[in-house]
Image: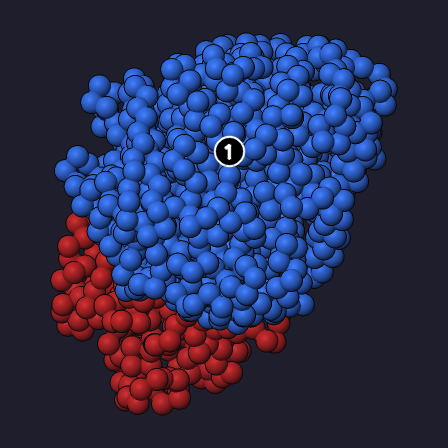
Chain colours: A red, B blue
Amino acid sequence: MAGVMADFGNFTHAVVRAIPSSLAKEALRMNVSDVDLEKAQREHEVYVGVLKQKLGLEVIELPADESLPDCVFVEDAAVVCGDTALITRPGAESRRKETAAIRQILKELGLNIVDMSDENATLDGGDVLFTGREFFVGLSKRTNQRGAEILADAFKDYAVSTVPVTDGLHLKSFCSMGGPGLIVIGSSEPAQKALKIMQQMSDHRYDKLTVPDDIAANTIYMNLPGKGHVLLHCTPEEFPESAKVFEKLKDHMLIPVSNMEKVKVDGALTCCSVLINMKAKV
Amino acid sequence: MTTEVGSETEVKKEPEKAEEQPAKPELPATNQTDEVKVVEAAEQSNESPALATDSAEAKENQEEAQPADNATGPEGEEPPASPPASEKKGISRFLPPWLKRQKSQSTVGPKESQVTPKEEGGVVLLKGEGEKAEQVEAEQTSSTTAAEPQVEEEQVNGEAEPEQKEEVNSEEQAENHSTGSAETQPAKEEKASEKSQEKSAAEEEKKETEEGGEEKKDQEESLKPEGGRYFIKSPLKLTKKVKMVMCHVIMLDGSQFPCEVEKRAKGQYLFFKVCETLNLLEKDYFGLSFKDNADQTCWLDPTKEIKRQICNTSWQLAFNVKFYPPDPSQLTEDITRYLLCLQLRQDIISGRLPCSFVTHSLLGSYSLQAELGDHDPDEQRLDYISDFQFAPSQTKEMEEKVVELHKTHRGMTPAQADTQFLENAKKLSMYGVDLHHAKDSEGVDIMLGVCANGLLIYKDRLRINRFAWPKILKISYKRSNFYIKIRPGETEQFESTVGFKLPNHRSAKRVWKVCVENHTFFRLMTPEAPTKAKFLTLGSKFRYSGRTQAQTRQASTLIDRPAPYFERTSSKRISRSLDGAPVINMIEAQDSAPTSVGNGREPGLELSSDSSKVEEEPSERAAATPTEGTEMKRDEPDSSQQDLDKTQEDVLKHQASTSELKRSFMEATPETRPSQWEKRLTASPATSLRLQAQGRSPPPTTQEPLPDLTVDTVSKSSDDKQKSDETTLQAAEVEIEETVVVEEIRVAPKGSVTITTPEVVTPVAVETEVEKPEEEVVEEVIEEVKEEQKRPVSVSSDSHSESEEEAGEYHPQVTVNISVEQIKEEPEKEEEVDNHEEPEQVAEPEPLPEVEVETMPSPAVVEERPMAEPETALVVDAPVEEERTEDILVTPEEAPNGHAEDQPGLLAVEEEEEEEEEPRVNGDASHAETELIPQVICCSEPPVVKTEMVTISDTFAAQKTEIATKEVPIVHTETKTITYEAAHLDGSGDGEPGILMTAQTITSESLCTTTTTHITKTLKGGLSETRIEKRIVITGDSDIDHDQALAQAIKEAKEQHPDMSVTRVVVHKETELAEEGED
């Protein structure tokens, strides 16, 4: 029996989406940059390959939609926790339609779908940090209070605390979970400030793993049967200093995954998949 | 104790009565207490004539008495024992009225014993003095209308715990009445009627009954023929006739538990009854709740009378979990867990504990397993399950899920299922969170969530801020505002204060109380010592009186009984279709849904009652409670003294007006008046609630140390010595300031001044003013008053609030002794102003370890000050203090905390004072302004015992210092009190009551010093006098040169107020003897 708040990091399924060719030019980005589409697609293939082959997850690949240049970043379209999937209302107008396909597949997977129908609400999944015991929702350019409220309504078991995100795109642009009770955090001032707020707001204690580069703090943690702690993180090529930090995690199966191209359009590792634990379905 | 208390009260009353009705028949008292009273009354009668005697004689008598006291020295510390009335009287006489009340339990006994030997000769004279004071008090008390509702409680003051001034006043009144009733019926009746009226009014406001109250009530009832049937049943007093009332308690399983209790029974009596019925030992997590007039759920204070707390007629209460154990697996007994499960089911069904679909299903399945056992495959239909409610709104889908999950629990015992239920429920984010509606500083609707870890702030469903207990320095409320002072963060220099607006005063107080209780229960090792009333401390002194989680856990380890059998009642139908408030729902559910299958058990679980262990707790509580009550009493004296001048009629009128004011005030919606305070609040990043401490309106300029410093000091001080203390409890001090009665009284006398508004005597800006010449003061006062009216919420200015505007403060820090105490009005000042005779009183009130330096402007000072009086008066006080210290000593372990529990009888006033002081002693240092030679040093070690009081009075110039020292060799602790006074130029008897402008405590790092400053302004003729009283606590090991520290403190004080003169220095030294001193 999966009790309340059990099995953090235990996933069985992953939903991913292919990269549309429109991504190179049309995808939203905070900084001007040229994206090598082919390189990005290769990167993504490796990413999916890790999930599928290396980790043994059942990966559901959605086809790209050329009209949705950012559609590869499926994380923003849905927040899945337990057997409930909150279909978001992305803060970027151009991305609103990305949710349809995601919703469809999640529903097919048997998850309880919660829609964010309030037109005043916006929420990007990238602003949602789930620690296993509670949610932190970054109030950013893409996510507002109302969106956070709806998330809180969708996941009533958990405390949902809001964290102002003044710098960077999303809350998870500079942090993520690196293990149960372990927050990987960037070393920038905004990141550290956000961490402080999170620590203050929480009834729980979190260890922190500070990495020099904010974006390197975005990792994917899983706790898989037979594999134990798994951490997908940046490669030494991208962030050598940060990569060294991760190498200190002795208990984790460390899997460096390159994300050089997608990051140019503000895509972090977590952005490219929606992880689901179907066993969690009680 | 009770007897003692009674004696005190009686004494006080007597003077009045005597005046009014010279001959008063003494009522035969069946109870010990009654007897005592009688005796006292007799004495009083004797005394009454004495009262007439000149003050001079009285003084002489006192002097004589003092030596006698010394001789008698032995402490009759037996709390319960009824000391000879004469003894009591003697003591009481000596003690200033407030002191008497407070001290009644612990100190009184010893004092009395001392007094007795000389009584005849000296007594009369002594009484003359004491009586005067008493009389004044009595009058005042009578005058204090506000308190009336509480009056009933009074007789046993020692037991009673003073929470609010109002109560105190009422108590006093009650005492007076009771005594009066005993003596003369007519007088009694009148009083009673008044009381009743007052009571009704007071009840509306808030009534916190004190333990003592019950006894008093009992007496009253016995006296009153009206009472109807008399039962001999009261647990406390065998002989009393009691009126019984039928209570209905809704149990967690939804059943009704009818219970007949005395009308005056305290909350704990009923609570223990319920626990006994449930066969519950781990009862500290639970409590009784009721709905107030506003339909808000309130916790029944176990230490107070039920009648005073519940609204009007309904004796409907509910048994609920009060403190949700964060880890239910640590509970010792299954029955406790079971009850917790029942509570959580209620919480879930009512929606108070939100859960996801899955969680609802999962928890529901465990409930089924616990109640029904393994899933019965034969019972295919879902019917059986639809009788149960698992969620506020449950669907067929959910029921199916529940059944599906139920199947997986096969083989699980009920206890295991409960455990699983709790293991999941405890993780829910709203588990054990008590929500209260509020608004932030910007008027945004938020929710305050009080829980084991601290205070959570929600906006809608979102947590927008969180203040863990360790982050909170102080909790307070004022009017409808609730404040928390936040410890500065790493990068912050200053404390900040966050203010919240509650719907009304009552709700603000409720939140405050809940916070105090939760903090104490979950964070402290032992409950805080009841606030030791500093004399004039206003406001609620409410403290959690039960056991802490740590204590209850420890106690649970001692539970040695076979797991009690209890029957699990079905959750079927309970509260079905009731989404609203859980408690109420339960009731309704029962009534409406009798249909419930056989499960609908009768009240309570049928258990074999092992009551043996249960009994232990009650006794503890009883012991604990008395301490709390003591504080209340102190407030009274102030008011009484002030009223001395007034005739009874005036007093009554005044009371009436006061009560009206209170009512109007109560009714007034707080929100209408925007407070500057609120405006000042700046939004914290997350919450936008924060307010910089600096920004406060009433920052006391006079005192050098800023709030920040305070904090630091506190921690340091704690570090120095009293590690034990810190660990134990000292954490939070609760100060509630209700100035209502006192202030009003003050105002009245001043009527000439222009201050018409009773509400306010604001201490706020006073400090700066203090330094200024007197004349200006008057203007300032007025201004202040105005200001207050405008802004109801002034954080710093605690001292002035009307009775209705209660303010509560609570310092939650565990390690900190006393960080900042605001608003204390010390009786001394007021008293002093009024009468010369009063000085004694003044001296007594002083906490042992503290050094008080009063600085008065030279011009006016002389007249007003009572202090000028000869040493003798002071000396009288000294004995009292000594006794106090002894009492304290008795409980060395808890001493830091100031728990009176150990000494049930003794506790009263003295203990409280001591307790309060003691904590401070540890970490406090002081500044004193004095020209006098500082010979005093305070070293206090927690368990110290020896006490000495030395009073020195100086001439006005303060050049001459005399020291009178009494040493009472007590076993362990040594306390010395030395008072230096500047003599009055003349005893100007016309001293008018002063207005307390400011009272505050500042803690500075230097020397571990804590300084409390009280600024009082008095207007006389065209002159105004400003009196500043500083209380400095120097704490240190033997390493510290206390003399030097004191000298420094005095020097600093002088420097601070160059234009003022030091008129009095009281040094209280407390030393722990090597023998005892384990520290």
Give the side of residue B989 with respect to residue B972, left or right: right
Residue B501 seen in the figure:
no
- Which residue is at a point 50% across and 20% down the rendered structure image? B122
The picture quadrant where one finds residue B921 is top left
* Residue B497 image position (x, y, % from top left): 44, 61
Q: Residues within 10 Å of mark 1 (few under 14, many from 20)?
A: few
Considering the numbered disc 1 on the image, is that residue within a helix, a strand or a loop? helix
Instruction: Name the residue rendered at 54%, 47% in the picture.
Output: B989
Q: Residue at x 81, y 33 (%)?
A: B190
Q: Is residue B736 above or below residue B906?
A: below
| Quarter of the image with the N terminus of chain B in it | top right
Query: Residue type at mark 1?
Result: Ala
- On the image, numbered disc 1 is attached to which residue? B56
Residue B179: x and y in percent read: 69, 25
Q: Nearer the viewer, residue B811 or B227?
A: B227
- State which chain disc 1 sits on: B
Residue drawn at the location 73% of the way across and 12% of the way down: B28
Q: In what quadrant of the picture does the C terminus of chain B appear? A: top left
